[in-house]
């Protein structure tokens, strides 16, 4: 590509002598460098050109041309661009600035393409005006690579915030502090690694309800009124479905044989008891209806693992007596609860059946 030098602003004799001297050694015989308007053919080999003779108030311009002799690229030096070196493209009528080199700043005004494999930036502050930073740019086909931001931490392990392509999720490998709210889409929420334990907010739009799951089963639900529903909290109820006689002068276990409700499969109709499967604090209530005899005492008791824990005994003034009892017990795994009836009369008496007459109920409260 021919090269032109606009030397009209220079001390012409001094500048031309320097450039001509530079190209004389090893240059082709037809190499000539003059002022603007003169053409050089061949190769310009200029080891060093000292432009100290440029007038500080003027501008020196170097032109690059295409094969047709049209100027396409300029480099200007001097006051016309505020004491900067400026590289610009030229379309024949106007110039577009591509780069400016000042006293302390280099400004790239055109596109910057870096084709190497590593770009190192040693500046302390990096400011980017674009509202998107695109990683893995140009990737086509099925994605396989993770992408993210890594922070070097000296002697500590590096920290990363990355897109995990295998999991199809974002990851923060060193914890995450959120100053504001985390907004989850309808039906989504916070989960563990295998996504069988999680919290969701609004499983349907505007439900305004929080759901808590473990092992893919809902355990707790808080609705928009503040009501808390412990869906899998231990609770069971049993009752007597046929009349049963109880012996005189002793406590007799009541053969509860029908399940009223049972959230965690704890009602045992074979052994007529409730067996808890999780330790905790429980409230236990029971009721019994007896075909009684006046002026005799009758009672009901709550037993834990075969031993009485609460009793209620009273004298009957009528032919039927209805007794209730309640207590709070701390129970361990596999502890069992039963109810017993007491008869002070001289012979057997009948305990009446029915879910509202003779029953045992239990619920875990802590």
Image: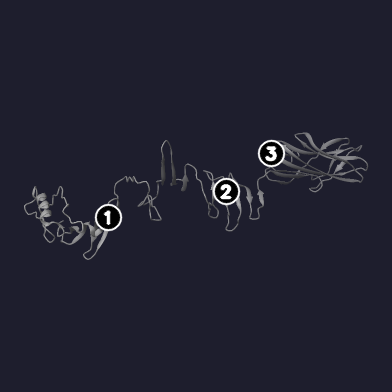
Number of callouts in the render?
3
Q: Which mark is residue 280?
A: 3
Q: Which mark is residue 199?
A: 2
Residue at the disc numbered 1: 100
Query: Which corner quadrant of the image does residue 62 belong to?
Result: bottom left
- Badge 2, how many Cα within 10 Å: few under 14, some, many 20+? many
Q: In front of the other: label 1 or label 3?
A: 1
Identify the residue at image location x=41%, y=37%: 154
Query: Quadrant where the N terminus lies?
Result: bottom left
Mark 2 to mark 3 CA distance (whole Å): 24 Å
* N-terminal label among 2 and 3: 2
Q: Looking at the image, can residue 284 be seen?
A: yes
- State the image coordinates of residue 339 (x, y, percent, origin top left): 79, 39
Callout 2: SS? strand
- Badge 1, how many Cα within 10 Å: few under 14, some, many 20+? some
Mark 1 to mark 3 CA distance (whole Å): 76 Å
């Amino acid at each position: 590509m021919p090269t032109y030098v606009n030397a009209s602003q220079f001390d012409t004799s001094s500048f031309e002598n320097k450039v001509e001297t530079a190209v004389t050694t090893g240059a082709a015989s037809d190499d000539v460098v003059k002022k603007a308007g003169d053409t050089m053919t061949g190769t310009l080999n200029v080891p060093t050109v000292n432009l100290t003779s440029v007038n500080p108030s003027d501008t020196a311009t170097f032109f690059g041309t295409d094969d047709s002799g049209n100027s396409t690229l300029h480099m200007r030096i001097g006051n016309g661009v505020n004491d900067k070196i400026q590289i610009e493209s030229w379309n024949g009528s106007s110039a577009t600035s591509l780069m400016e080199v000042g006293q302390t700043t280099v400004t790239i005004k055109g596109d910057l393409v870096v084709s190497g494999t590593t770009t190192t930036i040693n500046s302390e502050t990096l400011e980017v005006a674009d509202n998107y930073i695109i990683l893995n740019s140009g990737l086509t086909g099925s994605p396989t690579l993770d992408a993210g931001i890594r922070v070097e931490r000296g002697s500590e392990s590096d920290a990363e915030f990355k897109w995990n392509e295998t999991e199809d999720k974002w990851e923060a490998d060193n914890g995450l502090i959120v100053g504001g709210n985390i907004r989850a889409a309808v039906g989504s929420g916070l989960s563990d690694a295998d996504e069988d334990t999680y919290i969701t907010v609004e499983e349907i739009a505007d439900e305004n309800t929080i759901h808590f799951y473990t092992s893919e089963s809902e355990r707790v639900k808080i609705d928009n009124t503040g009501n808390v529903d412990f869906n899998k909290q231990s609770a069971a109820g049993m009752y007597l479905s046929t009349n049963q006689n109880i012996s005189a002068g002793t406590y007799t276990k009541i053969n509860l044989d029908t399940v009223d409700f049972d959230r965690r499969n704890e009602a045992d109709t074979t052994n007529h008891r409730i067996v808890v499967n999780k330790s905790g604090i429980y409230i236990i209530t029971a009721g019994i209806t007896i075909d009684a005899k006046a002026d005799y005492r009758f009672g009901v008791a709550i037993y834990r693992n075969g031993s009485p824990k609460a009793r209620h005994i009273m004298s009957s003034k009528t032919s039927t007596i209805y007794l209730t009892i309640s207590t709070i017990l701390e129970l361990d795994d596999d502890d069992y609860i039963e109810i017993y009836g007491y008869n002070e009369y001289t012979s057997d008496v009948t305990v009446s059946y029915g879910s509202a007459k003779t029953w045992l109920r239990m619920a875990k409260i802590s």
